[in-house]
Image (tube, rainbow, N blue to C red):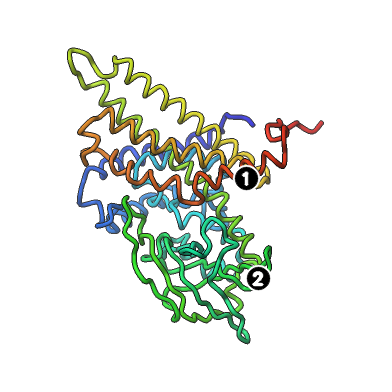
Amino acid sequence: MDFTISPELEALRARIADFVETRLLPLEENPSCYDEHENIAYETLEDLRAQARAEGLWCLQLARETGGGGLSKVGMAVCYEEMNRSIFGPVVFNSAAPDDGNMMVLEKAATPEQKDQWLKPIVDGKVRSSFVMTEPHPGGGSDPGMMLTTATKAGDKYVIRGRKWFITGAGDASHFILVARTSDDLRRGLTAFLHHRDEPGWRIDRRIPIMGPEEHGGHCEVVYEGMELPADRIILGEGLGLKITQMRLGPARLTHCMRWLGLAKRCTEIAREYAVNRHGFGVRLSDRESVQIKLGDLAMGIETGRLLVMKAAWALDQGSFARKEVSMAKIHVANLLHKAADVGIQINGARGYSKDTVLEWIYRYARQARLVDGADEVHQMVLNRELNAEGRDFWRWNVQEG
């Protein structure tokens, strides 16, 4: 792959960078700009979203005919990294999880009628959405094959029963993509459905408290108690729910990594700025070899992560599923983000542990990175499976066709 980007993409990146620098970063220091769950307050968010839309920085990941900016996955890597230099960035540009992944899968898999009813309102910023898959033990988590929630056909409808948890954004969402079991077929046993928050037969049992700041709508435990859905709510087709999860989760894992790189770079910036200005025992912190080693190691780790993300993004753009590329990026960048926040706090000392910077916010947020969309160990198992299947070809170079 070619690591140069077009002048047009660079211009777009620069516009995002200016928006983040001038309009978002100053707000992070204002307590009134946060809601009770440490995310950006809705009043502040809506104003900034209007500004982003007016400047053509809205939903850049979607096709132009859908209402987006038509970015490739490589273009998304460039722009998402820049957006998440601020903790408020992604949601302002309508590129935050879970809406981001939900919009992309609906763009690919929904019918024209479904897109008009279920996708367009998310694209327009009128509603939020949620992806309902994970279940408490002994149900499905990283292994969808363990799913216990059922969708039983009754005439021309499906009756949904089951329990889900850690459903991101459910508290504020209006549109839901629900994955449930329609048969015991190992490959075609799951089906994806669409439903609205106002439909009867389901409830949010609780908003699960977590250690870190939350996405809007939190992480909820959801119960389905006989919800009835018509057949036209099925996405792609009955029995194709596993395909929907694969279509959604692969790119979504990578977009997480794109955003996390921006946060890792921000941690490094805060650490470097403090190290340059802080003196102790007659020596500036940035002149101490121990600090230089920490920052140099972070710089290398971030660049390694960018290369892994770019390779995976390029592979997706070429039509590959990029399973091993996405898994490698997910493992590395998730751990990198936690390390960057930790090093940033260590260099800043008590200041880093306080709320005078966003380091402690990022630190608490970062711990979930090694769990969401597949724990480290799951992705390591994926890589081992690919290694066993491919042998030495695991490391093969792609050869241009002559």
Left or right, residue 326 beside residue 360: right
Q: Disc 2, disc 1: CB below 8 Å?
A: no
Mark 1 burial class by Cα count in 10 Å: few <14, some 14-19, many 20+:
some
Q: Is residue 200 above or below residue 79?
A: below
Q: 30 or 315: nearer the eye?
A: 315
Amino acid type, mark 2: Asp
Residue at mark 2 to residue at mark 1: CA–CA distance: 25 Å
Question: Quarter holding the N terminus?
Answer: top right
Residue most extreme to the left: 281
Residue 233, x across and y down, in percent:
57, 74
Q: Which of the 4 image quarters holds residue 28?
A: top left
21 relative position to 236: left or right = left
Residue on which disc 1 sits:
323
**Mark earlier in primary sequence (2, 1):** 2
- The residue that mark 2 highlights is 184
Residue 294 drawn above or below residue 100: above
Q: Quick one: 339 or 66, which is closer to the camera?
A: 339
Up the image or down, 50 lies above or below 204; here it is: above
For the point 43% across and 62% down, the residue is: 167
Residue at the extreme front of the image, as rendered: 138
Q: Which residue ends up furthest to the bottom in the rendered image?
A: 155
Residue 335 x/y as whole percent: 44, 38
Q: Any mark on residue 10, and which?
A: none
Residue shown at 60%/62% (left/top)? 145
Left or right: 372 as drawn, with respect to 207: right
Q: Picture coordinates of residue 299 (x, y %)? A: 43, 26
Image point (37%, 24%), residue name: 295
Q: Which of these two is toward me, 331 or 34? A: 331
| Residue at 45%, 80% in the rendered image | 201
Mark 1 lies on a secondary structure that is helix
Q: Amino acid at mark 1?
A: Arg
Note whether 325 is above or below 94 in the view shown.
above
